[in-house]
Image (cartoon, rainbow, N blue to C red):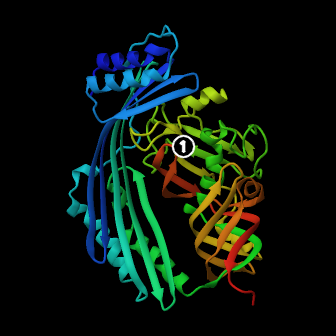
């Protein structure tokens, strides 16, 4: 822990060659990984992460470096090395450091560090045994717990000292069902910025049964026939479409470089009038939440799209200078080894006025994507391709036969305009999002939505 005097000395050293802003990011993290597979614990890792990152800005120019020598001398050595990145006259910048008093809205009632591995393995055993015994076709089950217990302290030349304590925990389940010539996989997780009370509050047996049922159902499904038709994307992890195909294109990381399909469109109608999309890092104990971002700015609720109108981008300090936009509390990084940049937190479409049942009933013929998988997207064009892990046909306003091997193909900007029904059943799913500043926890979410027309790929033949 640095004293105020030591931190100020390091920051002043950073500014000696004309920088106009400097920042110290100190981190102490304990990360634990547990895996249960084949009835045995196959992984038990603990990582200790300790270090500091220093950043110096001059307008929108940046130099960044990091070290795990967080002594005063170690930080001064790094500061003296980094400051050579600028060669200007020293600016007249004076500051005093004061700690910002911020409430902790994401308390861990059962601190992960207070439990033994024996206690944690009991949660894994519950979901593992439930899934393994669900059906004779299930050939493999992998249950994992990932936890990331992070304490950060941020000092900057605006005079701020901001601290945060984060406990991200996630229990994930992967189930494989097989028969001769066919293998199907289902996956889901439960996660939050909280403690192990999260798993005590959930019915883990029902959770595991739901994942196992998905794998078994898809095992007997026929191949999807590629076609263009109305597509209903279910709630929860279905929000990966918004996150990948639209959300990344709203991050200043892309917008400031002119590499986003949404550049220069603030105030314009970019989506159906029934669409409102939000990124909210304040939601208590959500997977993507924190009290402050990784620049020390309090997180907040950012309305990205309101009634189809583009209202905001997600903007960090450096890109705010480039874009001349307001900072939105959206700067994130994996660890002290990464410079922060604009990233999503918990991103979702808000509830609409329809029910799930109404959307199905009002679809004469279409495709229901119940569980989404992975995919790829180009933020500059918005073009995407996503796998569907569990899908069904809709015929005569009813969900009928399961189909497998479906992919959703389209353009994020176009899809936003094609949404014509939104349900009132908002929920979120939990993923790890990778970008310039590393891999970070991020929630994706939405109510069930209907897209009027969309290309669904598949290898099935027409009957």
The mark tally for this picture is 1
Direction from residue 345 to residue 394 in the image, left or right: right
Front-lying residue, 181 or 246: 181
**Which quarter of the figure is the N terminus placed in?**
top left
The residue indicated by pointer 1 is: 343
**Which quarter of the figure is the C terminus placed in?**
bottom right
Where disc 1 sits, the SS reads loop
- Residue 383, x across and y down, in percent: 70, 57
Which corner quadrant of the image does residue 391 belong to? bottom right
- Residue 216, x across and y down, in percent: 49, 83
- Residue 41, x across and y down, in percent: 26, 69
Query: Vertically, is 378 above or below 265?
Result: below
- Residue 413, x across and y down, in percent: 74, 52
Q: Is residue 260 visible?
A: yes
Write the residue at 49% across / 7% down. 92
Query: Vertically, is 357 above or below 29?
Result: below
Front-lying residue, 274 or 100: 100
Direction from residue 436 to residue 195 in the image, left or right: left
Which corner quadrant of the image does residue 140 belong to? bottom left
Q: Is residue 236 visible?
A: no
Front-lying residue, 85 or 44: 85
Write the residue at 75% across / 47% down. 308
Which corner quadrant of the image does residue 446 belong to? bottom right
Query: Vertically, is 197 above or below 123?
Result: above
Classify mark 1: residues with Cα within 10 Å, few (<14), some (14-19) or many (20+). Answer: many
Write the residue at 76% across / 37% down. 267
């Amino acid at each position: 822990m640095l004293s105020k005097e030591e931190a100020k000395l390091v920051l002043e050293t950073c500014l000696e060659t004309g920088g106009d802003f400097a920042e110290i990011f100190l981190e102490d993290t304990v990360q634990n990984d547990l895996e249960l597979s084949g009835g045995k614990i196959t992984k038990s890792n603990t990582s200790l992460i300790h270090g500091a990152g220093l950043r110096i800005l001059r307008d929108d120019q940046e130099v960044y470096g990091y070290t795990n020598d967080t002594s005063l001398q170690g930080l001064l050595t790094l500061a003296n090395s980094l400051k050579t990145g600028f060669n200007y006259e020293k600016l007249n910048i004076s500051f005093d450091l004061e700690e910002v008093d911020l409430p902790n809205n994401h308390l861990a009632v059962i601190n992960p560090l207070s439990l033994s591995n024996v206690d944690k393995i009991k949660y894994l055993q519950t979901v593992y045994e439930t899934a393994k015994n669900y059906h004779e076709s299930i050939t493999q089950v992998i249950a994992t717990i990932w936890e990331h217990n992070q304490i950060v302290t941020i000092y900057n030349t605006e005079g701020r000292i901001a601290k945060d304590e984060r406990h991200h925990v996630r229990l994930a389940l992967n189930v494989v069902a097989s028969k001769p010539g066919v293998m199907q996989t289902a996956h889901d997780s439960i996660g939050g910025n909280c403690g192990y009370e999260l798993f005590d509050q959930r019915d883990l047996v029902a959770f595991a049964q739901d994942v196992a049922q998905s794998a078994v159902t898809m095992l007997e499904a026929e191949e999807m026939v590629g076609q263009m038709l109305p597509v209903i994307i279910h709630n929860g992890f279905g929000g990966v479409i918004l996150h990948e195909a639209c959300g990344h294109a709203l991050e200043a990381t892309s917008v400031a470089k002119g590499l986003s399909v949404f550049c220069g469109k603030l105030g314009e109608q970019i989506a159906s009038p029934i669409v409102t999309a939000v990124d909210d890092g304040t939601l208590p104990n959500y997977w993507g939440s924190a009290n402050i971002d990784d620049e020390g700015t309090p997180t907040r609720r950012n309305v990205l799209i309101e009634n189809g109108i583009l209202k905001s981008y997600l903007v960090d300090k450096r890109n705010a200078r480039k874009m001349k936009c307001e900072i939105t509390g959206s700067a994130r990084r994996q660890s002290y080894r990464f410079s922060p940049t604009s990233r999503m937190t918990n991103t979702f479409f808000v509830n609409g006025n329809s029910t799930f049942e109404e959307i199905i009933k009002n679809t004469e013929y279409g495709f229901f994507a119940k569980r989404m998988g992975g995919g790829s997207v180009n933020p500059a064009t918005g073009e995407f391709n996503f796998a569907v892990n569990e899908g069904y046909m809709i015929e005569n306003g009813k969900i009928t036969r399961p189909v497998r091997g479906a992919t959703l193909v389209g353009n994020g900007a176009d899809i936003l305009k094609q949404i014509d029904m939104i349900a009132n059943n908002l929920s979120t799913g939990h993923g790890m999002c990778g970008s310039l500043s590393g891999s970070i926890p991020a929630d994706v979410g939405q109510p069930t939505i209907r897209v009027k027309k969309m290309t669904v790929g598949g290898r099935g033949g027409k009957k």
